[in-house]
Image (spheres, rainbow, N blue to C red):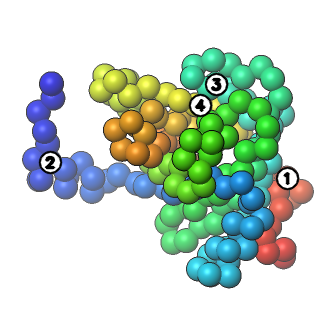
Amino acid sequence: MTTPLTADELRRRNATRKIFQIALVTRDLERSMKSWVDNLGIGPWTVLTFTEESVRHLKVDAQPVTVPFKFLIAIATVGDIDFELIQPVYGPTIYEEFLQRRGEGLHHIKEKIAENDLDQVIADYAAKGIGVLQTGWFDVDVHYYMDTEPKLDFIFELGNCPRLELPVGSYSTYPAE
């Protein structure tokens, strides 16, 4: 059993951490983006399509995904935080299963971890009994969804979080430019 951290230890530890993203799952990406723009003034949204063509080494529950999959992601940046909306379309990802069990809403919070530190941080979580639910690469961006839902009621994601230079034509924008 680990010794709980003191308040001062927590302050020092958290002073340099970077929460990068808050993500929600939705059944209707366009409806959700419109609602965020109309009600919160949050946007514009960069909309990406993720398939076996654009995501490398996708694993769900440590098993390589070998069948077609598709999910849509929309990202809007507010200050230093990215909001992400995810709509599963088909194939094995953790998003549809989450929607079936919990419905639309908060799916994960993502912390930026230096790429050189990711293996150690994942090992530290594993030592606490927290494994990886899903992982994969999009361009130079890697994600690790940690199995924190039983302990926290949401998934905690780790990743290197680079700002990607997306080629024109590889995404759309909502509202349109």
Nearest to viewer (mark 2 / mark 3): 3
Callout 1: helix, strand or loop? Answer: loop
**Front of the two marks 1 and 4:** 4
Q: Earlier in the sequence, mark 2 or mark 1?
A: 2
As measured in the structure, the alpha-carbon distance from the residue carrying label 1 to the one carrying label 4 is 22 Å
- Amino acid type of disc 2? Glu
Single out the mark in the foreground, 1 or 3. 3
Is 125 displayed left or right of 82 in the figure?
left
- The residue sitting at 45% across, 33% down in the picture is 147
Mark 2 vs 4, N-terminal side: 2
Residue that lies at the very extreme toward the right in this rendered image: 169
Can residue 165 be seen in this snapshot?
no
User: In percent of the image, x 39 and y 36: which residue is there?
Assistant: 150
- The Cα–Cα distance between marks 2 and 1, rounded to whole angstroms, is 44 Å
**Type of amino acid under label 3:** Lys
56 and 98: which is toward the camera: 98
Q: What is the quadrant of the N terminus in the image? A: top left
**Rendered image: mark on residue 170:** 1
Q: Are marks 2 and 1 in contact (CB under 8 Å)?
A: no
